[in-house]
């Protein structure tokens, strides 16, 4: 609570300067504190006939507000302010809050797909490279490929079950519905083989787009899997092992890909696929610990990856390059940023006391409980996660600084506050994770 009060008080210094935000500020903060004080217990809390919350949606709604608020702080300064970008960010946040609290499957689908429009606008409208149009098309193509069949499946569920309320839908013993719904959410996480849109989108997206993509949008797929597992039990018990094998093999391959990357932003995007592969495996085991571990890792990864993209953006603004061949020897020039690189990377590779540690330990227990044959792959994934984290740190911070480059970095207290507000929740929430293991 103290961290949230600190963040809101500091952001007031920036919000009062912009007339556009003043109209939303008081209402936004009111609802934010409302969500903090909701006592859900561990049951589903119905707000209306179509809106409701449990601990899954509660945590992801808070994460959405947190990341969107930090995104607005990153994207503004005293000299320039893009009203359209802020409006786009507010619309996305409202869509996410409604989606995570939606009980009706059809409305959930509408909001689920609508959340992609602000992201595509961010990539195409505020991306720096010429290839941003292609990245937006990649994202649109991969999502539309599975979204239309998903709508047909939802209509089929309505015809069979006479309801679209997710808690009232009984076991659906239809193979086609299982395959289409699973692929619709796996492409958002994303699972290996259908992950190319993520790499393309991250490399072309602006900083705000990368923060939203890594911090929130990847978690939408995991949230959807949590919801549909309850009425797809029959085929889940029979066919989930296919996705589990693909995800863990893909996670191992992507951890190897991280080691050979020279683009820092692409390396962090590949590491997101590695983390999400463990989340996919844990969720599809349908064990209580798998759901809890996947949920914890999604929260922790949303904070750590967003913070890493901010650090990469600082260096990009200095050198106009994300290559490790140019960004090296920076510890002697910017020791304070070197400290933040260490803190963020240590949390990202699941060092204590981060949430990622608890999430990965829980998922490793679940995966080994499902099959001991996964031990070797898990050892290699964990090892290479440390390797590529040390790789990006040593290459960027050590070595010889390039001569002839004139740089100047002026960091305000706002920049440090943004980094602190990524790191503190990620490392202090581990003190209160007992409720996360009771949500299933």
Image (spheres, rainbow, N blue to C red):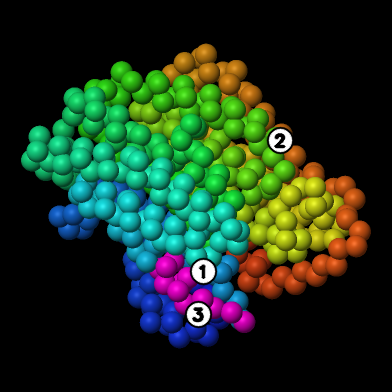
Q: Which residue is mark 2?
A: 260
Q: Position of residue 77 (x, y in %)?
A: 60, 76
Main secondary structure of the magenta stretch: helix
Q: Which residue is mark 3?
A: 15
Q: Decide if residue 100 is on the left or right side of residue 194.
A: left
Q: Considering depth in this image, is 258 or 29 the residue closer to the camera?
A: 258
Q: Quadrant of the C terminus?
A: top left
Q: Which residue is mark 1?
A: 72
Which quadrant holds residue 252? top right
Look at the image and tell me whether residue 130 can be seen: yes
Q: Which mark is residue 335?
A: none
Give the structural element (helix, strand or loop) at label 3: helix
Determine contact: label 2, label 1, CB under 8 Å: no
Q: Decide if residue 106 is on the left or right side of residue 417.
A: left
Q: Is residue 142 magenta?
A: no
Q: CA distance from mark 3 to mark 1?
A: 10 Å
Q: Which residues are magenta?
A: 79-90
Look at the image and tell me whether residue 430 can be seen: no
Q: Position of residue 276 (x, y in %)?
A: 50, 37
């Amino acid at each position: 609570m103290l961290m949230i009060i600190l963040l809101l008080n500091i952001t007031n210094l920036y919000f009062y300067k912009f007339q556009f935000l003043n109209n939303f500020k008081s209402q936004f903060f009111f609802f934010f504190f409302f969500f903090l004080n909701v006592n859900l217990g561990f049951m589903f809390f119905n707000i209306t006939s179509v809106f409701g919350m449990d601990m899954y949606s509660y945590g992801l709604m808070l994460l959405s507000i947190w990341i969107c608020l930090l995104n607005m702080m990153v994207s503004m300064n005293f000299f320039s302010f893009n009203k359209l970008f802020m409006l786009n960010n507010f619309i996305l946040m409202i869509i996410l809050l409604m989606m995570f609290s939606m009980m009706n499957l059809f409305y959930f689908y509408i909001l689920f797909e609508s959340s992609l429009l602000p992201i595509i606008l961010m990539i195409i409208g505020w991306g720096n490279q010429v290839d941003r149009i292609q990245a937006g098309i990649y994202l649109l193509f991969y999502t539309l490929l599975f979204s239309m069949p998903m709508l047909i499946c939802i209509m089929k569920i309505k015809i069979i079950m006479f309801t679209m309320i997710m808690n009232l839908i009984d076991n659906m013993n239809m193979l086609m519905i299982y395959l289409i719904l699973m692929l619709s959410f796996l492409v958002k996480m994303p699972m290996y083989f259908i992950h190319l849109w993520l790499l393309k989108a991250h490399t072309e997206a602006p900083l705000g787009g990368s923060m939203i993509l890594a911090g929130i949008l990847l978690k939408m797929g995991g949230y959807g899997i949590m919801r549909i597992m309850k009425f797809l039990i029959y085929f889940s018990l029979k066919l989930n092992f296919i996705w589990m094998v693909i995800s863990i093999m893909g996670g191992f391959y992507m951890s190897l890909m991280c080691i050979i990357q020279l683009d820092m932003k692409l390396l962090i995007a590949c590491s997101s696929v590695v983390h999400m592969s463990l989340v996919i495996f844990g969720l599809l085991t349908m064990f209580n610990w798998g759901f809890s571990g996947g949920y914890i890792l999604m929260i922790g990864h949303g904070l750590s990856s967003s913070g890493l993209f901010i650090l990469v953006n600082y260096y990009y603004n200095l050198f106009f390059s994300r290559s490790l061949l140019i960004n090296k020897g920076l510890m002697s020039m910017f020791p304070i940023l070197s400290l933040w690189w260490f803190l963020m990377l240590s949390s990202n590779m699941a060092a204590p006391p981060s949430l990622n540690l608890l999430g990965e330990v829980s998922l490793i227990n679940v995966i080994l409980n499902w099959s001991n044959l996964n031990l070797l792959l898990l050892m290699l994934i964990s090892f290479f996660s440390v390797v590529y984290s040390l790789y990006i740190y040593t290459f960027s911070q050590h070595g010889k600084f390039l001569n002839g480059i004139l740089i100047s970095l002026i960091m305000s207290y706002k920049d440090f506050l943004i980094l602190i507000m990524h790191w503190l929740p990620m490392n202090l929430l581990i003190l209160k994770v007992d409720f996360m293991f009771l949500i299933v």
